[in-house]
Amino acid sequence: MKTLRETLADADARRVAVGHFNISELGALKGIFAAARELQLPLLIGVSEGEREFIGVRTAAAIIKSMREEYGYPIFLNADHTHSLEKAIEAAKAGFDEIIFDNSSLPLEEDIRNTKEAVAAIRAIDPSIVIEGEIGYIGANSEVMDAAPEHIALSTPEEAARFVAETGVDVLAPAVGNMHGLLKTMVAGTAHKELDIALIGKIKEAIAALPANAQGGGRWMTLHGGSGTEDREFTEAAKAGMTIIHVSSELRLAWRRGVEQGLREMPDEIAPYKILPPAIEGIRAIVADRLKLFNGLE
């Protein structure tokens, strides 16, 4: 079975993307894992700081490690949007496979300085951990919103190359028209996020020209805020150089709708595992669809 680094290198070489899906409870994980196994594709499970606080940092790590060992399956765990050095160190010590250190809300100079410090601290604990950094600004919440967040800022190839070279990260998360969360118009199906595919290609070219770091990374990219993106743009983004694509808000919405359906259909039921199947199936269907798009499958 491949490591996460080997999995990312393989995806990058084939210009496909590894699917990254967030969870905060086991029903969502069940649906996500079922979709990945059905398609026999590798999988990244993300838990943000809030999700980790709810599940438990070590509990999340133990669950994913157990699944990987029991099924012999390439499922990996990411500490999504980690904003402090303390939280990054906590995830590294717990055994996470990837850590996103996100100081993108700060000026670039400060983001570089803090991310470089985090990279050194994480590498000292376990040099095999894949480390990601983020530049630009795409909002901060996976919610359904009336309007897009203010101060959205796209990344430039020059910023990207400098950030990767100076911090030593394995993976870069740039702002390329993506956005965290969903607008109500996106939920209604009357609007989509519009990615700048040309910009993705230019940033990929800029960081691909850099020498690989000592761990063999530094030239991979992640697309955050994938929910609400037009289908064809997922495939185009992977071909342009996105090695990981995140989807979270769509799954949260599917979970909510599925739970509501389960309660309507079984108003007197009190066993959670009997109420949750519509939510699990809704998540499974979305993940299967997205994984096909990320991998250019029919």
Image: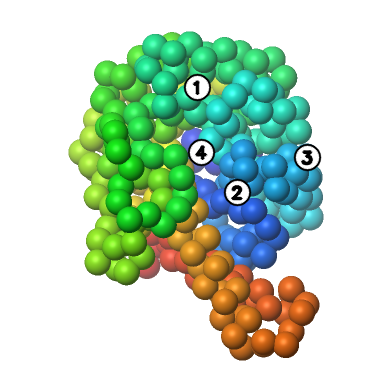
Q: Which of marks 4 and 3 is nearer the N terminus?
A: 4
Q: Determine whether the residue tagged by mark 1 lies in a helix, strand or loop.
A: loop
Q: Is residue 116 visible?
A: yes
Dividing the picture into quadrants, the one containing residue 88 is top right
Task: Identify residue for label 2.
Answer: 45
Badge 4 crowding class, 10 Å Cα cut-off, few under 14, some 14 to 19, many 20 or more, is many
Q: Earlier in the sequence, mark 4 or mark 1?
A: 4
Question: Mark on residue 244?
Answer: none
Task: Identify residue for label 3.
Answer: 58
Q: Which amino acid does label 4 sit on?
A: Leu
What's the distance in space between the residues labelled 1 and 3, CA to CA?
A: 24 Å
Q: Which amino acid does label 1 sit on?
A: Val
Q: Nearer the viewer, residue 38 or 91?
A: 91
Q: How many marks?
A: 4
**Disc 4 and disc 2 in contact, CB within 8 angstroms:** no
Q: Can residue 209 be seen in this view?
A: no
Q: Which amino acid does label 2 sit on?
A: Ile
Q: Disc 4 vs disc 2: which is toward the camera? A: 2
Decide if residue 211 is on the left or right side of residue 128.
left
Q: Which amino acid does label 3 sit on?
A: Arg
Q: Compared with residue 50, is residue 267 higher up or lower down, i.e. above or below?
A: below
Task: Identify residue for label 4.
Answer: 8
Q: Determine whether the residue tagged by mark 4 lies in a helix, strand or loop.
A: helix
Badge 2 crowding class, 10 Å Cα cut-off, few under 14, some 14 to 19, many 20 or more, is many
